[in-house]
Amino acid sequence: MRIELQNIEIEVEKGDISNQADLDAVVNAANAELAPGGGVAGAIHGAAGPKLYEECKPLAPIAPGEAVITRAYGLPNKFVIHTLGPVYGKDKPEEQLLSNCYRNSLKRAEENKLKSVGFPGISTGIFGYPKEDAVDVVFSTLLTEIPQLEHLKKLRFVVFSDEDRELYESKLREVALG
Ligand code: ADP
């Protein structure tokens, strides 16, 4: 699904975040140490290769809500933006921290004049953030950030299941209809 919102293309696609060849950057649902792990971080580090972690080491640790940018090595993108989501029920206020993840990731992309970036569902895996609540945070953050974007023209939400795709698509429709 693709909808244009204030001249920005917003896409929802089912797929693997480590296989988005047409995007300038992908966002990593990182851990504080920016180390390889499970889920998104495992896929990204696996595809990028060990040089990614070497570049990450001196940038770690990061706090919930922060985002840092590195090169992408074996990934088909130019950059990886690593952000640490809140652990649901532990890092508070979780809505604010999750919102900061998206805001700061967009900021890193803009600073580097990127045109397109792909996001996974930060915190909605191992970190346990309920998906419906997370999607609300994603789109409310997006609505406040879109007017500030100068270089970004395409944002893609890469989901892993049909259920998540439907959730994102219905929320995007709602937002697009105002
Ligand atoms: P976190 O630790 O921030 O919760 P996870 O990596 O555990 O992050 O999962 C975040 C979300 O990304 C989950 O909804 C999960 O289903 C999804 N996911 C896991 N692997 C991939 C992948 N390779 N590409 C896209 N989404 C993925």
Image (cartoon, grey):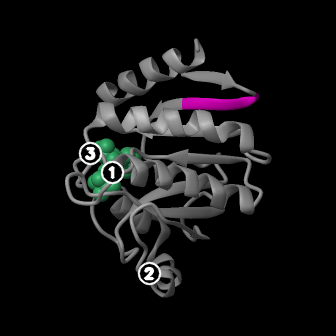
Front one among 45 and 59? 59
Tell me the residue at 64%/61% (across/down).
108
Q: Is residue 28 magenta?
A: no
* Residue 74 on image: x %, y %: 54, 67
Q: Is residue 69 left or right of residue 8?
A: left
- The residue where tag 3 is placed is 129
Q: Does the residue labelled 3 lie within 8 Å of ligand 1?
A: yes
Instruction: Tell me which amino acid carries mark 3.
Output: Tyr
Q: What stretch is highlighted in magenta?
A: 7-11
1 or 2: mark nearer the eye: 1
Mark 3 secondary-structure assignment? loop
Q: Measured along the vertical axis of the image, is residue 2 above or below residue 111?
A: above
Disc ID at residue 108: none
Tell me the residue at 59%/57% (across/down).
76
- The residue where tag 1 is placed is 94
Instruction: Tell me which amino acid carries mark 2.
Output: Ala
Mark with earlier residue (2, 3)? 2
Instruction: Tell me which amino acid carries mark 1.
Output: Glu
Q: Assess whether mark 3 and mark 1 are in contact (beta carbons under 8 angstroms).
A: yes
1 or 3: mark nearer the eye: 1
Front one among 45 and 164? 164
Residue 161 can be seen in this image = no
Q: Which image quadrant for residue 166?
A: top left
Mark with earlier residue (1, 3)? 1
* Residue 176 on image: x %, y %: 59, 17
Mark with earlier residue (1, 2)? 2
Say few, some or many: other residues with alpha carbon within 10 Å of mark 1 (under 14 / 14 to 19 / 20 or more).
many
- The residue where tag 2 is placed is 60
